């Protein structure tokens, strides 16, 4: 398959051609187990995102099949997930202003935009964005999302329709209206929570979401709880919707594009975390760019089927892997099972209590908490721990969508801070078994009289240029008066921008004014190219530019022997 002139492998066809009969039973078992979890979860996530129950089922079927054919992971199940649903609601609700049909149109358009952005990003090689959010910041962001979602479901557990937006406002409203709690709804919630908790303890791999659905429907049918005021889902339409073009206004495009960008970052980073974990567990490699394209195709498939944006689901992926799934055939089987339910068996879903959906969402969302990792961040790096906490607080206070920007900004600031103050060192020479090596004095290196070897541990760019100049100047003052060559080891400096080149020129001039020659060693790639383009390479001189530090040291030794020889002194 070709998109924008680039060939995109359809891995699902290769999987079908090489499929082994012995894999079938495991994939069928896994597919049934995935469907048992995905169906109730899809309905619950539809509620979380603000849609009718059937839309959640639509979003479980076509996207899973699309990823099965285009994705690089053998285990990953692409379905609705909590962070993505929270971002959908945050993007669409303010634009829809309570109009259900407009809400649906906006969601389809948002899903379409997200799919296009993902495909474009994958074709452009932007799969590296999965590494952009640091693990602590992503953890903190997901913690904030989890808290927001759970608080949003508390009203459902109590039988209250909470009007306030925002975590703190919702908590305040619930506290104020606690006396209005619907006793029957709360009782059903308690029974479901206790039942799921016990089953998770006794049978960890049991499909607890399906258990909540069965218990809830059974209680309504047997005890007639709907007639006593317990809210139920209501009729779920059979079959699939007819594809249609959504109507959106010109003023909707920019907010939808911003929302799509946020969903892309969060859904893809979350998906790749799950995908990589299971790829490592099962000993194979994945392709981030291919998976970004595959996620985009999955979103387009969801938009075509009137679903909403999706991501990789850790819970459904874990279920498939734990029940013996070997290939993406399990996702296809799960989709077929869900399609059959949607076509022929939707009647019982009408009696599903909405409080059961709240319980399912809360238990699913609880899996986003990773307190063990948070404690590890505190032990290893308190700075990254506080970045994680800041991301959580950002989501809670300003919302899910602005929280994406906060998480990205924290990642950028951390990256800039690390790159602006990299490690550097003045290096020495060490001779072992007749071989000369370059190393720090701590590792036994000795300084050479008249020579300074300086290594800077990052690219030389506008935001660290002053730091480089200050550190290099300090390094050049070792044994002031006896230094003749200042050798810059550029091996750890892959990039040089215009500001960095000007700074290097300034350093060269200052060194020259004190009788010290700047020598550049080990320059390569874009660093060397920028030296050439700015004319700095010519001003430094080919006779003072060397392919390695060893070559520079050898040239200095020859120069010294021709004048007065060389003397080694201890560090």
Image: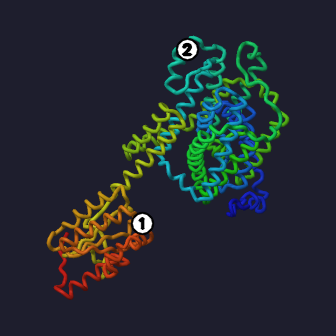
**Is 412 left, or right, of 442 in this rendering?**
right
Relative placement, left or right, of 313 versus 374 is: right
Give the mark nearest the N terminus, 2 or 1.
2
Hey, which quadrant is residue 187 in on the image?
A: top right
Quickly name the residue at label 1: 494
Residue at image point 61% right, 18% down: 158
* Label 1 environment density (alpha carbons within 10 Å; few <14, some 14–19, many ≥20): some
Tell me the element at label 2. helix
Is residue 206 at least partly visible in the picture? no
Residue 544 in which image quadrant: bottom left
Which residue shows up at 14% across the image and 72% down it? Answer: 481
Q: Which percent across, then down, holds residue 42? A: 70, 36
Residue 214 lies, with reference to residue 239, above or below; the image says above
Labels 2, 1: front one? 1
The residue sitting at the left extreme is 481
* Residue carrying label 2: 178
Q: Name the residue at 22% across, 62% down.
A: 474
Residue toward you, 187 or 452: 452
Quarter of the C terminus within the rendering: bottom left
Vertical comparison of 525 with 420: above or below: below
Q: Is residue 539 visible?
A: yes
Name the residue at the top extreme.
Answer: 179
Between residues 61 and 534, which one lies in front from this camera angle?
534
Q: Is residue 82 left or right of residue 16?
A: left
Residue 533 at what x, y percent from top left? 41, 72
**Outermost residue, right side:** 344
Alpha carbons under labels 2 and 1: distance apart: 60 Å
Residue 174: x percent and y percent?
A: 54, 18
State the image coordinates of residue 448 (x, y, percent, origin top left).
21, 75
For label 2, the crowd category at 10 Å Cα-Cα, with few meaning under 14, some 14 to 19 and many 20 or more, is few
């Amino acid at each position: 398959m070709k998109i924008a002139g680039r060939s995109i492998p359809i891995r699902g066809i290769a999987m079908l051609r090489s499929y082994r009969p012995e894999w079938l039973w495991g994939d069928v078992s896994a597919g049934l187990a995935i469907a048992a979890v995905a169906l109730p979860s899809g309905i619950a996530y539809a509620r979380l995102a603000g849609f009718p129950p059937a839309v959640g089922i639509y979003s479980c079927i076509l996207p899973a099949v699309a990823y099965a054919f285009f994705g690089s992971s053998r285990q990953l199940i692409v379905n609705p997930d909590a962070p993505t649903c929270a971002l959908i609601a945050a993007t669409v609700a303010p634009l829809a202003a309570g109009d259900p049909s407009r809400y649906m149109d906006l969601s389809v358009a948002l899903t379409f935009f997200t799919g296009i952005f993902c495909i474009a990003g994958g074709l452009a090689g932007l799969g590296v964005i999965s590494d952009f959010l640091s693990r602590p910041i992503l953890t903190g962001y997901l913690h904030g999302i989890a808290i927001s979602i759970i608080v949003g479901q508390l009203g459902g557990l109590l039988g209250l329709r909470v009007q306030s937006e925002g975590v703190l406002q919702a908590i305040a409203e619930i506290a104020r209206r606690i006396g209005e709690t619907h006793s029957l709804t709360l009782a059903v919630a308690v029974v479901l929570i206790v039942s799921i908790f016990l089953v998770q303890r006794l049978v960890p791999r049991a499909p607890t979401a399906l258990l909540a659905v069965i218990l809830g429907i059974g209680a309504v049918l047997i005890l007639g709880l709907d007639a006593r005021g317990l809210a139920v889902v209501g009729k779920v339409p059979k079959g699939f919707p007819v594809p249609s073009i959504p109507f959106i206004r010109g003023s909707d495009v920019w907010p939808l594009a911003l929302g799509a960008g946020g969903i892309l970052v969060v859904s893809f980073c979350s998906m790749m975390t799950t995908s990589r974990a299971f790829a490592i567990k099962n000993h194979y490699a994945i392709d981030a760019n291919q998976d970004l394209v595959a996620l985009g195709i999955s979103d387009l498939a969801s938009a075509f089927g009137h679903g909403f944006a999706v991501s990789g689901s850790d819970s459904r992926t874990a279920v498939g892997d734990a029940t013996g799934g070997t290939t993406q055939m399990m996702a296809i089987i799960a989709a077929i099972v869900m399609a059959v339910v949607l076509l022929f068996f939707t009647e019982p879903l009408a009696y599903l209590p909405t409080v059961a959906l709240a319980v399912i969402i809360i238990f699913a969302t609880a899996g986003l908490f990773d307190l063990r990792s948070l404690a590890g961040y505190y032990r290893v790096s308190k700075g990254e721990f506080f970045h994680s906490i800041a991301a959580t607080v950002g989501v809670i206070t300003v919302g899910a969508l602005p929280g994406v920007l906060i998480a990205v900004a924290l990642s950028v600031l951390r990256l800039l801070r690390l790159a602006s103050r990299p490690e550097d060192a003045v290096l020495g020479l060490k001779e072992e078994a007749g071989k000369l090596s370059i190393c720090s004095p701590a590792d036994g290196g000795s300084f050479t009289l008249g020579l300074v070897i300086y290594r800077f541990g990052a690219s030389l760019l506008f935001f660290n240029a002053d730091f480089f100049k200050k550190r290099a100047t300090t390094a050049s003052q070792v044994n002031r008066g006896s230094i003749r060559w200042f050798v810059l080891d550029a091996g750890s400096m892959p990039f040089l921008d215009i500001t960095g080149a000007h700074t290097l020129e300034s350093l060269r001039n200052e060194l020259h004014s004190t009788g010290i020659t700047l020598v550049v060693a080990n320059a390569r790639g874009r660093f060397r190219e920028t030296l050439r383009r700015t004319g700095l390479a010519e001003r430094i001189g080919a006779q003072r530019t060397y392919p390695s530090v060893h070559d520079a040291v050898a040239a200095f030794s020859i120069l010294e022997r021709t004048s007065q020889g060389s003397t080694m002194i201890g560090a």
